Amino acid sequence: MPDDVVLTEVRDGVAVITLNRPEARNAINHALGARLPEVVAELDARDDVAVMILTGADPAFCAGADLKELGSREGTGADALSVYDADGRLPYRGPFAPRTKLLIGAVNGPAITGGFELALNCDFLVASERARFADTHARVGILPGWGLTVLLCQSVGVRRARELSATGNYLSAEQALTWGLVNHVVPHEELLTFTRGIAAAIAGNNAEAVGELMRCYERVVNVTGDDAWDVEARVNFDWISRTYDPAVIAARRDAVVERGRSQNRG
């Protein structure tokens, strides 16, 4: 299986993962569908990686499933994407195994259908001005299997999610920002630099605390009301019981105060 369908670069605790089938707009063929989750798992396990960034080789982020390959291969689409087991079950939720480290999507161009799902499975998104989003599952005649109906509702609300999926219409980067799908929209040439800056800020924090916070968010968004408050309270109590050290807290506080002063001066 060729490794060059997914490129990686690790520097200063930040791993950049690049989907590398630009001639096919980074469409997910058998090789890419199998290699990408392996790469994410390998980087997640590395001690020298604190944060991961997922992007695509220009001009697209990901055009979704490689329909040309799906149409020419024998067997099913599930075989071609190499994500289902023999009984038709996913090995885990979404395209990636459970992670301990953040995955930021740097959406450099169109993120369509399965590519939209890859973006939604990132912890949050930074978009180039050239980014566009569309759920064309219904236009192609397939259904999502990587959590689009769950994650898109969480991102933009159920009514807007229904509209996007039912119409297959494209959402611009600026509209995605207005709807809360992406956190930032930046000039295309500045996308990775800007996203690396966010990743560096995350990498400068306590890695275990960041991981626990993200797991808490994941549990909270799947419950509502009093249950969500209870989840956060239990996570907080467990964290304090295991890690609380007044001396360490005091040292970190000084660093946090100085960082705030430097940012305000800027």
Image (cartoon, rainbow, N blue to C red):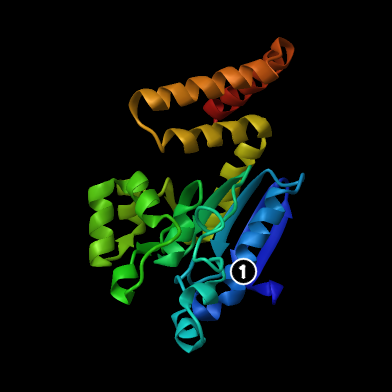
In-front residue for pair 162/84: 84
Task: Say which quadrant the N terminus sits in.
Answer: bottom right
Q: Position of residue 94 (x, y in %)?
A: 50, 56
In-front residue for pair 28/128: 28
Q: Position of residue 81 (x, y in %)?
A: 53, 72
Q: Quadrant of residue 211?
A: top right
Image: 203 above or below 179 = above
| Tag 1: amino acid | Ala
Is residue 168 something that shows in the picture?
A: yes
Image: 59 above or below 224 = below
Is residue 187 something that shows in the picture?
A: no
In-front residue for pair 132/42: 42
Q: Quadrant of residue 34?
A: bottom right
Q: Position of residue 203 (x, y in %)?
A: 66, 39
* Disc 1 target residue: 34
* Local crowd size for mark 1, using a 10 Å CA cut-off: few (<14), some (14–19), many (≥20): some
Image: 244 above or below 139 = above
